[in-house]
Amino acid sequence: MQNDVSVSSSYSPQAGTIGAAQNRVLRNTYMLLGLSLIPTVIGAVVGMSMNFSFFSGSPVIGFFAFLAIAFGFFYAIERTKNSAWGVAILLGFTFFMGLMLSRLVGRVLGMSNGGQLIALAAGGTAVIFFGMSTLAATIKRDLTNMGKFLFVGMIILLVAGFANIFLQIPALTITLMVVAIGIFSAFLMYDINRVISGGETNYISATLAIYLSIYNIFANLLALLGITNSSD
């Protein structure tokens, strides 16, 4: 009986400390994630008012320019993730992503039921987010291999998307959107699980990863709804 008490007392404080740290990272991640949506909305509104289009000149140049800017932000966020500058740069990135989203949002709003489609895409994204969050909290096994698999899938998706700039195949476009929703939904579960399990201890890095998944889920859902609505 004495042994049981000594084992419990030696492990409980450590487990409680680790659990508290993980909960703090998760809480800060969700708070920053909510904050990051504000610059995204502002960026989308500004982009629509400016008729912003990143790919109007040359889609190929625009594609690589976007990647260069995005990875520049990723690098800057990673270098400053332990300071307040990391939050500022992350919010700057989400504003930029709002600009990138503005053309799609503007096109959908131009439809007769555009507002309903945007609300539906937002609602669908929220359902996926809460579903993946719940699933992430219940999974106990190591998901490292899943992360590697998803990264490979994302690279293939990126290459296929670039190829479709030239091919312009409608069926491939829709397929890529559906696959993207699946891949980033899985990424969402994976990244939240990493925070919960202690695999990610920096809330700025965690917010960036989760934000990218939510952004891509919403954008692809909205584009898919826009395509199906225009074909009705």
Image: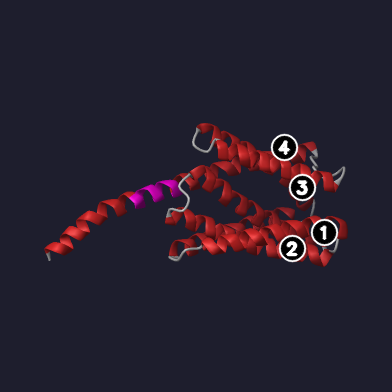
Specify start and end residues of the magenta stretch as a single range: 18-26
Give the image location of residue 66, x and y in percent: 74, 43
- Between 157 and 53, the one lying in front of the other is 157
Please tell me whether mark 4 sits on a helix, a strand or a loop: helix
Instruction: Decide: few, some or many residues near mark 2? Use Cα within 10 Å; few <14, some 14-19, many ≥20.
Output: some
Going by the numbered disc 2, the residue's amino acid type is Leu
Name the quadrant containing residue 46: top right
Give the image location of residue 150, x and y in percent: 61, 61
Residue found 53% across the figure and 60% down from its top = 189
Decide which of tag 2 and tag 3 comes sooner along the chain.
3
Q: Pointer 1: what residue? A: 164
Q: Which disc is residue 106 wearing?
A: 3
Apparent side of residue 138 relative to residue 109 in the rendered image (left or right): left
- Which quarter of the rendering shows the C terminus? bottom right
Q: Pointer 2: what residue? A: 176
- Which quarter of the rendering shows the N terminus? bottom left
User: CA separation, marks 2 and 1?
Assistant: 9 Å
Residue found 50% across the figure and 33% down from its top = 83
Instruction: Say whether residue 7 is visible.
Output: yes
